[in-house]
Amino acid sequence: MASGKIKPLGHKARLGRLGEAAAAEELGRLGYRILQRNFRCRGGEADIVAEHGAVLVFVEVKTRTELRHGRPRDAVGWTKQQRLGAAAVVYCGREEIEDREIRFDVVEVVVLKGEVAAVEVLAAAFTPDV
């Protein structure tokens, strides 16, 4: 885009941002302390990095507008799990974090008619092979 104008967000991007905001709000309500959102690195990414008590938590947020193809958690397959695990390795290296319990959570967000209808936190949803 040569004009320098900001490209408007598409439906999928808007939905993702709405879901991540709802997830962050719910995590905060549950006592998580958000450290970073949208952590990206070569080979991995984490939607949210947070602390829950003494545990460092890497969170994948999945947002859906319908459930006919399964729950949002069903979209967190092996590849996505490995990418979250890779992000955790890089994050801990950059922050010089050692000897700390780490957990991988999934937050499901369901949006109906443009409004957040449900948010569910699945603590310790998986363990990646990293």
Image: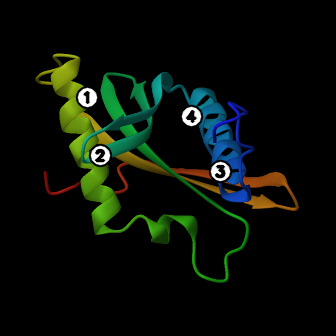
Tag 1: amino acid: Tyr
Instruction: Specify whether 130 is left or right of 37.
Output: left
Q: Secondary structure at mark 3?
A: helix
Q: Tell me the residue that label 3 is attached to.
A: 13
Q: Tell me the residue that label 2 is attached to.
A: 44
Q: Earlier in the sequence, mark 4 or mark 3?
A: 3
Q: Secondary structure at mark 4?
A: helix
Percent x, y of residue 1? 63, 42
Q: Residues within 10 Å of mark 1 (few under 14, many from 20)?
A: many
Q: Residues within 10 Å of mark 3 (few under 14, many from 20)?
A: few
Q: Secondary structure at mark 2?
A: strand
Tag 3: amino acid: Ala
Label disc, if present, on residue 108 of the rendered structure:
none
Q: Tell me the residue that label 4 is attached to.
A: 27
Q: Earlier in the sequence, mark 2 or mark 1?
A: 2
Tag 2: amino acid: Gly
Percent x, y of residue 28? 59, 27
Badge 2 vs badge 1, beta-carbon distance below 8 Å: no
Q: Tell me the residue that label 1 is attached to.
A: 91
Question: Which of the two residues, 16 or 73, is positioned nearer the viewer here?
Answer: 16
- Distance of mark 4 from mark 3, alpha carbons? 21 Å
Question: Which of the two residues, 106 or 82, is positioned nearer the viewer here?
Answer: 82
The type of colouring in the image is rainbow
Query: Of the residues tagged 1 and 3, which is closer to the observer?
Result: 3
Percent x, y of residue 121? 53, 48
